[in-house]
Image (cartoon, grey):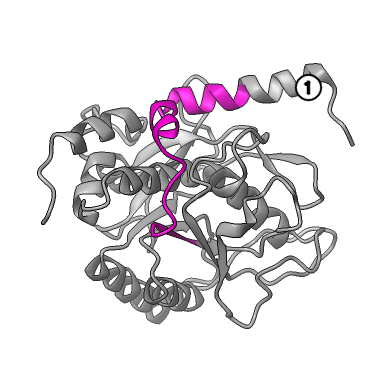
Amino acid sequence: MRRSQDTAVAVSDCLMSALDLLNLGPLMDRTQGRPEVIVGLIDGPVMMENPQMWSSAVRYLDSGLAARCAVSASEACKHGTLVAGILSAKRGSPAPAICPECTLLVRPIFPEFVLGGEQWPGTSAHELAKAIVEAVKAGARVLNLSVDLLAPSSGGERQLSEALNYAAAAGAIAVVAAGNQGLVGSSALTRHPWVIPVIACGESGEPLAISNLGASMATRGVRAPGENITSIGADGAPGTFSGTSAAAPFVSGAAALLWSLFPRATATAIKLALTRFQARRPLTLVPPLLDAWAAYRNLAGTPMRA
């Protein structure tokens, strides 16, 4: 279905607001990404038949779950496609399309079926740990984890911690959605010292009420737009979604652009540019707003490895 001109203008204005809030525009003007920068999308399958998706830059990892959508009505397909569009849609599409020329490595982790008309994507710590290791072994340098953990267990959380340690040792940055339960606290994902936790904010930059908060997120994380974000829908039309799942790929995309512009930078340098050099308020549970241009300027003045 074609959008009206007024609707198209509204989508464009909303998109520019999100990108401007993070100062992402100057980075996107400089690069669309590089194929050697691989972003691991650990999420649902992706509807690649949409002509506005940059399909030539997509690879798939066989996990026993289909990497391409078979059931477009499933929440897994909807979720994976919306997140993928933020990263890898074509420039000029309704989606942010932050780093379309980076390689998107799709490692599906959500089963694709419909339960009672709707099923919210989630996974176990054990399955997520396995997916992280597989994606890193396949070359992922940035991991986007817009996931909820189901039925946490001490054994699964230990495996997840070991998998994130493995990612850190391999030099792969893990960007993690903080969660949408409106809670104060941390999870096995957000408390790990290597990850970048991301909370969601509205157009004003203030945190959404549904976004989880916590001391670990305020210390090591950032916030990014996560309210009514427009991307590529699984049914072929633009779709919108909200929450930390929508916010996380803005940070993953920024990391991928920075690595494309500074290919000799270490994972630690990229991570610190995204987090440490953002202005933090004392005695708060709210992390700073990501400033992608400040991260770029910091890296431009940082000696690179040989």
What is the magenta range?
14-40
Which residue position holds label 1?
7
Percent x, y for residue 293?
Answer: 32, 28
Please determine whether, in this image, residue 74 is positioned above or below residue 109. above
Q: Residues within 10 Å of mark 1 (few under 14, many from 20)?
A: few
Please determine whether, in this image, residue 76 is positioned above or below residue 132. above
Q: Is residue 189 magenta?
A: no
Q: Nearer the viewer, residue 194 or 143?
A: 143
Percent x, y for residue 162?
Answer: 30, 76
Tell whether 250 sits left or right of 15.
left
Residue displayed at 32% across by 49% down:
259
**Quadrant for the C terminus in the image:** bottom left
Residue displayed at 82% across by 58% down:
73
Q: Secondary structure beneath disc 1?
A: helix
Q: Quarter-wise, where is residue 224 in the image?
A: top left
Residue 291 visible in the displayed image = no
Q: Is residue 24 magenta?
A: yes
Please determine whether, in this image, residue 19 is positioned above or below residue 306. above
Q: Quarter-wise, where is residue 287 in the image?
A: top left
Q: Residue furthest right?
A: 1
Percent x, y for residue 260?
Answer: 35, 47
Percent x, y for residue 26?
Answer: 39, 26
